[in-house]
Image: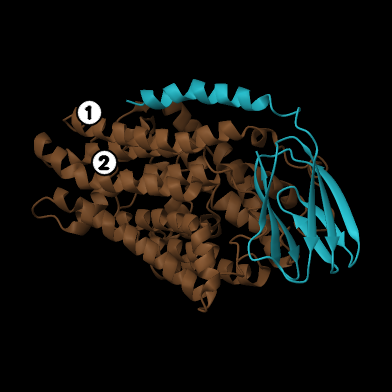
Amino acid sequence: MIPLHGIASREDLPLPFPLIVTAAALVLVVTFWILLFAWREPRYRNPSGRELPRLTKLVDSPWVSRPLRLIVGLVWLVAAAALVFGPDRTDNPIFGFVFVWLWVGLVPIALLFGEVHRRTNPIRLLLRGLGGTAPAPRTTTKSRLPAAAALLTFAWFELVEPLAATLPVLRGAAAAWVAWVVVGTLVTSTRWIAMADPFEAFASTVARMSPWARSRSGQLLLINPLRNLASWNAPRHLSILTCVLLGSTLFDAIAGAAWWVRAFQDSSLPPRLVGTIGLVATVALVTALFHLSVLPLRRAGRSLRETADALSPGLVPLVAGYFLAHYATMLYLEGQRTAIRMADPLALGWDWFGIAEAGPDLTLLAFPTLIAFVTVLFIVGGHVMAALVSHDIALRDLPAGVAVRRQVPLLVFMVVLTIVGMLLMFG
Amino acid sequence: MLRPIRALLPLALLAALAGCSTQDSAPPTTIHLDVRAQAPEEPVEERVPLGSEVTLEVSSDVDGLLHVHGFDEELTLTAGETTEKTFKASMSGAFEIETHDPDAVWIKLVVS
């Protein structure tokens, strides 16, 4: 059983062992450097940055938002056509659209352009009449638990469900997603979309790591990504959402490991049961360890959940780093293939952009050493950002000397996660 | 504070350039595969250099379709006959070579 059978057709080469050792050493040294020698006063309390009034005007004008929504809306319509009327084969573009463009592609888009998915979310476009596309006055801190549950379900669908890459099953999943968000919005309010749409919640979480933010008055800010993330007044249950993302990415690596596959094949239990147990156990373990590691940072009068939520922005760079390290080459190769297939959504031999003949560009894949270095750069970079953001948040409630000591478990948790993740995914 | 990471960049570029030079000098390779009714428990790992011409020579006991993932090459197998396909290993990475119906992975092709 290979997850995403027919979509992920290529695996990266394992990282050279000396590179893994160097990366692990770097992770340790940088972490302790942060702990012992970095700043002792919180720096990133406030989301301040350079205000960009002219860019704000341009970006918010209908001249930008209408064409943007029209184009993205059309892409979604083509995908929907492929889902409903396309052939049940792995070259149907809907599989690449969901598992590559949407799931993986949202991360770099959010990192580069900030909260853009919110403006083009197809469900918001659908619910335009209810005010789904109205600009958010301020980011809501309402619970992200519904989105965390939806993300866990999506991860289960992608990583466990053996028939995920078949059309009837994907149709059911897509219908369930639309119903989940639309019905919830009708019953409550448009706030439900931010709370419960897995893709929007994921994208807007990662967007907090981008160099773009909004001031209180709605002006666009150019901001240090570390500050953007550390100054986030984290929504309720963000800790659960980030742990679901971390845990399921980790489970993806476990499920690909040879020892798991062997144990999996040898067991007489049904594959869905084994996969479900594996996924839920990994997510539960990551969640439990994170909550345990923030325990010493708990301030009087604050619950463990509030403490974990306040510190969970620090996990976002780990998620983004893992994601890019694990999926960047897949996004490059399968993303291009999906583009070619999207130009022929019903498998009628169309080639709207004249790109089918040329096939995907493979230039980058001729440089395995470069790929290995960039992979390590993503992992180490994500870890360093995660440690810095956590450090800054931890300093807010405690005197520096105490805060440094009490951060140790959290940093150890991150170091272990990074190194185990690296060995699992790329060893 | 991000200096250690920046220091890696020139290294990465250097490594990329070094990796570049191996591209065109790789010799052609032939991989032989016997497809039997009984699939192997674990796929055989075959390593080929990046940029080489790979000839896949398959003799089969069964009718079927053999698929080289990633490169999207397909071979139609006929029982009792040998089929050949040549393609350029232009991407680095690990790729599965498998038959459909019965689903079995025969070779893990490692291009490096």
Q: Which residue is mark 1?
A: A38
Crowding at dot 1, Cα within 10 Å, few <14 / some 14-19 / many 20+, comes out as: some
In this structure image, what is the colour of chain B?
A: cyan
| Residue B54 figure quarter | top right
Chain shaded brown: A
Q: As shown in the figure, which amino acid type bears the numbered disc 2?
A: Ser
Q: Earlier in the sequence, mark 1 or mark 2?
A: 1
Of A296 and A221, nearer the camera is A296
Q: Tag 2, which chain?
A: A
Of A354 and A91, nearer the camera is A91
Crowding at dot 2, Cα within 10 Å, few <14 / some 14-19 / many 20+, comes out as: many
Query: Helix, strand, or loop for circle 2?
Result: helix
The total number of labels drawn is 2
Residue at (45, 32) in percent of width and height: A56
Q: As shown in the figure, which amino acid type bears the numbered disc 1?
A: Ala
Q: Could you say where residue A278 lies in the image, as x and y percent from the top left? A: 43, 67
